[in-house]
């Protein structure tokens, strides 16, 4: 049991964190973002925050302007972002509080290639993350109050971190509502919804871009969500996520290559692609300029699971329809053991997340999804043509049980 002294100490730390990191003035700029029934209220001290949110999440979410009054459903999370004039002194005081209380830092990464940051878990469901690279800022998290704060040292918004703090509550609440978070890309092609599922380096992005070149509309890139409709069918839903493509994918696709060559390089994610960590990174406005049309489909039926298998030596593409057992093993592995992003805040334990993922995978498998492996090589191998021929029949016939 927690002693009276420990309760007092926890309360004291909570008071320190609230006092040191709370907003120093009213946050006048507000909006509500809703995706598949899950919502986030976003309150910012300056208009720039809302502009960033509209640019990177607007194409995927329904947005309603807020007012100074509270806005949104009770179950919505609230994300605050504001500048602290004495930011450096605040961080120094926080670290002294955590050190005195014997609270060690937990190194975390928001995505696998991210710089490491320090997370301080000062009581159950409450944390402060100190970010130093590639930007300076604090993330203050309270699970029970359903709030997150992105505290900045100045007026500048880090675009990538704004994406993370706004979409993380959506990621968690969608999973809690039964949606599957999947390391996959998705597209709508010739009236069918294709979920391109596979591990890192399997060719998901390369195959997605091949489909986009032939008129497909993107549902997702690398981070996908699928949910069961009231009628029992499964559908993919578009989810905001930065597009990251390796050099090999760019060189493989003439449309993508030429469009990125034309882009001005400003170093600003709001305006242009940024080359980072060996990949081209960009958000929806660049995606729209690349394909020269509306490239996004907010939802599509999940008609076929495709497991890409890129082989640089391959000159001819081939599709193999998968038997049920192999489909089961691959789907379970992807949903349970290969998450697209780390869970860098303590919403729940790893075991709880795995339990949710396992239950969702079993629900998806109950629908007996059709699946195939699509092996392909460089641009001449034409995997899209192979897929068109596969889809042209009345159904995708399953291999042996």
Image (cartoon, grey):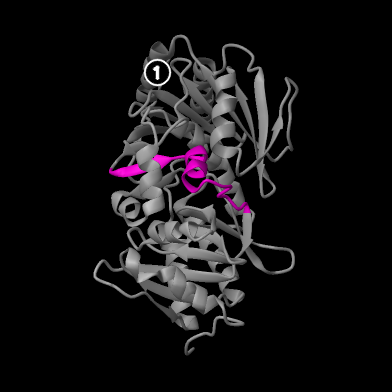
Which residue is at the front of the view, 138 or 321? Answer: 321
Which residue is at the front of the view, 211 or 330? Answer: 211
Residue 194: where, in percent of width, then height? Answer: 53, 66
Q: Give the residue pinned by disc 1.
A: 91
Q: Is 132 placed above or below 309 here?
A: above
Q: Image check: 26 left or right of 220?
A: right
**Residue at position x 61%, y 47% from top?**
173
Q: Is residue 294 magenta?
A: yes
Q: Image check: 2 left or right of 254?
A: right
Q: Is 325 placed above or below 98 here?
A: below
Residue 320: where, in percent of width, then height? Answer: 42, 80
Residue range (magenta): 278-298
User: How crowded is the residue under tag 1: few (<14 C-alpha within 10 Å), some, or many (20+)?
Assistant: some
Q: Residue furthest top?
A: 85
Circle 1 SS class? helix
Q: Can I make out residue 301 in this image?
A: yes
**Residue at position x 64%, y 54% from top?**
177
- The quarter of the picture where residue 207 lies is bottom left
Q: How many marks?
A: 1
**Residue at position x 38%, y 38% from top?**
262
Q: Which residue lies furthest to the bottom in this view?
A: 400
Q: Is 244 placed above or below 200 here?
A: above
Q: Is 307 placed above or below 131 here?
A: below
Which residue is at the front of the view, 327 or 396? Answer: 396
Residue 127: where, in percent of width, then height? Answer: 47, 32
Q: Image check: 289 left or right of 173?
A: left
Q: Can I make out residue 338 in this image?
A: no
Residue 341: where, in percent of width, then height? Answer: 43, 49
**Residue at position x 53%, y 27% from top?**
149
- The quarter of the picture where residue 161 lies is top left
């Amino acid at each position: 049991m927690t002693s009276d002294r420990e309760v007092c100490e926890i309360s004291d730390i909570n008071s320190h964190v609230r006092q040191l990191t709370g907003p120093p003035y009213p946050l006048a700029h507000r909006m509500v973002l809703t995706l598949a029934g899950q919502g986030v209220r976003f309150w910012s001290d300056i208009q720039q925050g809302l502009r960033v949110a509209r640019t990177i999440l607007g194409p995927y979410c329904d947005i309603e302007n807020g007012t100074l009054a509270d806005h949104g459903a009770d179950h919505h999370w609230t994300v605050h972002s504001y500048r602290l004039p004495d930011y450096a002194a605040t961080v120094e005081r926080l670290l002294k509080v955590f050190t005195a209380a014997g609270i060690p830092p937990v190194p975390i990464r928001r995505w696998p290639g991210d710089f490491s940051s320090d997370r301080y878990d000062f009581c159950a469901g409450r944390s402060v993350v100190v970010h130093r690279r590639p930007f300076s800022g604090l993330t203050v998290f309270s699970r029970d109050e359903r709030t997150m704060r992105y505290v900045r040292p100045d007026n500048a918004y880090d675009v990538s971190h704004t994406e993370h703090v706004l979409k993380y509550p959506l990621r968690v609440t969608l999973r809690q509502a039964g949606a599957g978070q999947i390391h996959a890309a998705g597209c709508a092609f010739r009236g069918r919804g294709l979920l391109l599922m596979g591990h890192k380096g399997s060719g998901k992005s390369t195959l997605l871009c091949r489909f986009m070149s032939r008129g497909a509309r993107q549902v997702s890139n690398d981070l996908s969500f699928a949910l069961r409709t009231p009628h029992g069918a499964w559908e993919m839903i578009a989810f905001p996520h930065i597009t990251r493509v390796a050099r090999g994918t760019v060189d493989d696709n003439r449309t993508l290559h030429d469009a990125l060559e034309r882009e001005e390089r400003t170093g600003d994610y709001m305006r242009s692609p940024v080359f980072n960590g060996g990949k081209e990174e960009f958000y929806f406005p660049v995606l729209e300029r690349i394909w020269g049309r509306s490239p996004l489909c907010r939802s599509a039926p999940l008609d076929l699971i495709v497991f890409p298998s890129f082989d640089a030596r391959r000159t001819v593409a081939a599709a193999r329809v998968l038997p049920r057992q192999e489909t089961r093993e691959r789907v379970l592995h992807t949903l349970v053991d290969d998450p697209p992003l780390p869970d860098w805040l303590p919403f729940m334990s790893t075991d709880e997340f795995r339990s949710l993922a396992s239950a969702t995978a079993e629900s998806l498998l109950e629908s007996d999804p059709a699946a195939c492996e699509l092996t392909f090589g460089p641009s001449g191998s034409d995997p899209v043509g192979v897929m068109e021929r596969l889809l042209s029949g009345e159904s995708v016939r399953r291999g042996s049980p």
